[in-house]
Amino acid sequence: MEKIALFPGSFDPFTIGHQSIVNRALPLFDKIIIAIGYNTLKKPLLELEKRMQLISDVFPSNPKIVVSHYQGLTIEYCTKVKANYLLRGLRTAADFEYERAIGQMNKAMNPGIESVFLLTAPEHSFVNSTIVRDILFYGGDASKFLPEGIDIKKYLS
């Protein structure tokens, strides 16, 4: 059976922390679907198409990575795309508690899908999309928190 992981998030924007999780997970899975979900609680800075393009630009020509988007429950999208793993990064103890609760609910809803948690690399543990989004919104320089070679101005227009 092919090992397919779904890495869900709003990715607004996709940061070096997200990139690190994907790069470290690549040897573990046959395919990683980076899926942008619709979050009713967040007003995005970057349009969906721009977020998808940014992620595609971070991983050009990698046949193991697919960039997608969805609405609705993540666990249902896993079933739709035949993902048998949910990939999540953990920065803090609070992240763990939150993700553990979601993982247990997901397991109750679909026992065939495993949640896989990777600890964030220490040098990225403070990187948070919400804070990076605020830096960008107010015109600050967030380049050190974004994947190398990404000119965020290209995606903001």
Image (cartoon, grey):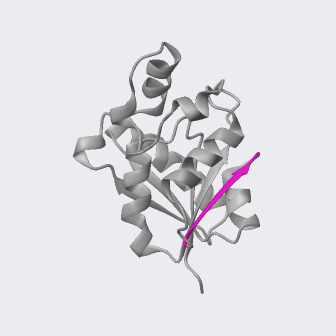
Tally of numbered discs: 0
Q: Position of residue 113 (x, y in %)?
A: 59, 68
Q: What x and y, as percent, mark residue 10? A: 60, 40
As drawn, the residue found furthest toward the top would be 138
> Foreground residue, 5 or 31?
31
Above or below, comparing residue 83 to residue 55 in the picture: below
Q: Is residue 133 above or below residue 60?
A: above
Range shown magenta: 64-71
Query: Residue drawn at (43%, 69%), measured in percent from left and top?
Result: 26
Q: In the image, is 65 to the left or to the right of 49?
A: left
Residue visible at 31% across and 33% down in the picture: 126
Q: Which quadrant does the C terminus fall into?
A: top right
Vertical comparison of 3 with 7: above or below: below
Residue 115 in the figure: left or right of residue 144: right
Q: Is residue 25 left or right of residue 155?
A: left
Q: Is residue 39 left or right of residue 132?
A: right
Q: Is residue 127 visible?
A: no
Image quarter in which the N terminus is found:
bottom right
Residue 92 highlighted magenta (yes or no)? no
Q: Is residue 65 visible?
A: yes
Residue depicted at x 62% and y 68%: 111
Percent x, y for residue 30? 52, 77
What residue lies at 55% left-to-right and 78% top-to-bottom?
A: 3
